[in-house]
């Protein structure tokens, strides 16, 4: 499709028309040949139509700009209202959300060469929650409406490591792994801990015959969960920790990893 005549063509046509009219008057020619008159009329009509269409386009572009501006303003208001409503629901039902992962603590027992949580064996540092009693979309897990019982589904984690060590471990623990986990997805907050959709172990303190192995290396943590034996045996070469110092040493190290990962804690240290 060829573009319409440009301004230069229009100017040249106007000049030719004026010259033709002068010649016709000079020599008494009453009218132009029919084919020329028809073509001139066709050009004039379409030029007028083109001007009208351009005017409509200008009006549509102005309306487009106005609508875009209005939609942008309404969208910002809608975003704020949606955020307020989600925050209201989360607060009402104890859900938590953070732009960074929420940190918590867990303990695993070592049985038959595997790391056992309260309900499941962990073979990798990552665990995704499932609900054994209630269906529904995956993004609703962990449920916070009581449909799956008093305790509810989700990956559990404690807010503090010291109360967890005192509550779960016997007076003289022999083998266990304590860890710092990053909680993601939907997170429901409780008084002493959380229930989350996802958990990723990011630091561990493994106790084996009064020896302590600490690491936040992802590859080492992955090997520990896949096959604890070889990793735990490597702790045998370390110095024994007095039993009365064991819990404190584990807690001190894991809390140091929490401070290293928590941006708010880091800001507090430098304030």
Image: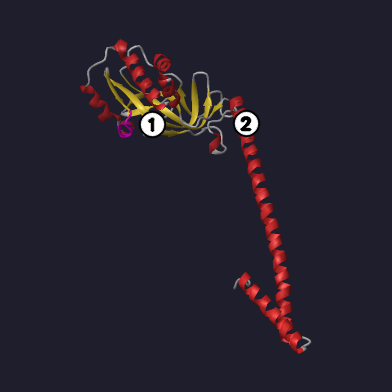
Residue 56: image x %, image y %? 71, 60
Q: Is residue 232 left or right of residue 171?
A: left
- The local crowd at label 1, few if under 14, some if 14 to 19, many if 20 or more residues have their Cα within 10 Å, is some
Residue 20: image x %, image y %? 70, 83
Marks 2, 1: nearer the viewer: 2
Q: Is residue 43 above or below residue 117?
A: below
Magenta stretch, main secondary structure, is: helix
In the image, 83 versus 149, the foreground residue is: 83
Magenta stretch?
216-223
Q: Residue at x 22, y 18 (%)?
A: 239
**Element carrying mark 1:** strand
Q: Is residue 216 left or right of residue 24?
A: left
Among the 4 quarters of the image, the one containing residue 230: top left
- The local crowd at label 2, few if under 14, some if 14 to 19, many if 20 or more residues have their Cα within 10 Å, is few
Judged from this view, the residue extending furthest toward the front is 26
Q: Is residue 138 above or below residue 150?
A: below
Q: Disc 2 to disc 1, how far (Cα)?
A: 37 Å
* Display colour scheme: secondary structure
- Give the number of the disc on residue 165: none
Among the 4 quarters of the image, the one containing residue 126: top left
Residue 258: image x %, image y %? 40, 24
In the image, 40 versus 61, the foreground residue is: 40
Q: Is residue 68 left or right of residue 226?
A: right
Q: Which residue is mark 2?
A: 84
| Quarter of the image where the N terminus is located | bottom right
**Element carrying mark 2:** helix
Q: Is residue 132 left or right of residue 223?
A: right
In the image, 118 versus 124, the foreground residue is: 124
Queried whether the magenta region covers residue 192, the answer comes back as no
Q: Which residue is mark 1?
A: 122
């Amino acid at each position: 499709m060829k573009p319409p005549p440009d301004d230069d063509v229009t100017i040249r046509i106007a000049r030719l028309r004026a010259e033709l009219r002068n010649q016709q008057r000079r020599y008494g020619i009453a009218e132009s040949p029919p084919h020329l008159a028809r073509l001139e009329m066709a050009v004039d009509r379409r030029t007028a139509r083109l001007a009208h269409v351009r005017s409509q386009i200008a009006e549509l572009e102005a309306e487009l700009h106005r609508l875009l501006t209005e939609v942008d303003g309404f969208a910002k208001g809608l975003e704020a209202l949606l955020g307020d409503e989600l925050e209201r629901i989360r607060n009402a039902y104890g859900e938590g959300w953070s732009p960074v992962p929420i940190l918590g603590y867990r303990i695993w027992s070592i049985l038959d060469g595997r790391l056992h949580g309260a309900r499941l064996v962990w073979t990798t540092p990552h665990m995704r929650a499932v609900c054994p009693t209630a269906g529904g979309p995956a993004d609703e897990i962990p449920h916070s409406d009581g449909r799956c019982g008093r305790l509810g589904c989700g990956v559990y984690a404690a807010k503090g490591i010291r109360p967890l060590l005192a509550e779960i471990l016997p007076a003289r623990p022999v083998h266990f792994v304590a860890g710092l986990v990053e909680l993601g997805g939907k997170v429901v907050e409780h008084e002493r801990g959380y229930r989350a959709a996802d958990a990723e172990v990011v630091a561990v303190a493994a106790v084996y015959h009064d020896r302590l192995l600490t690491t936040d290396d992802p590859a080492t943590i992955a090997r520990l969960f896949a096959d604890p034996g070889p990793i735990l045996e490597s702790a045998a070469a370390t110095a024994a920790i007095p039993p009365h110092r064991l819990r404190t040493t584990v807690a001190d190290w894991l809390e140091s990893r929490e401070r290293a990962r928590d941006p708010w804690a880091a800001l507090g240290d430098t304030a």
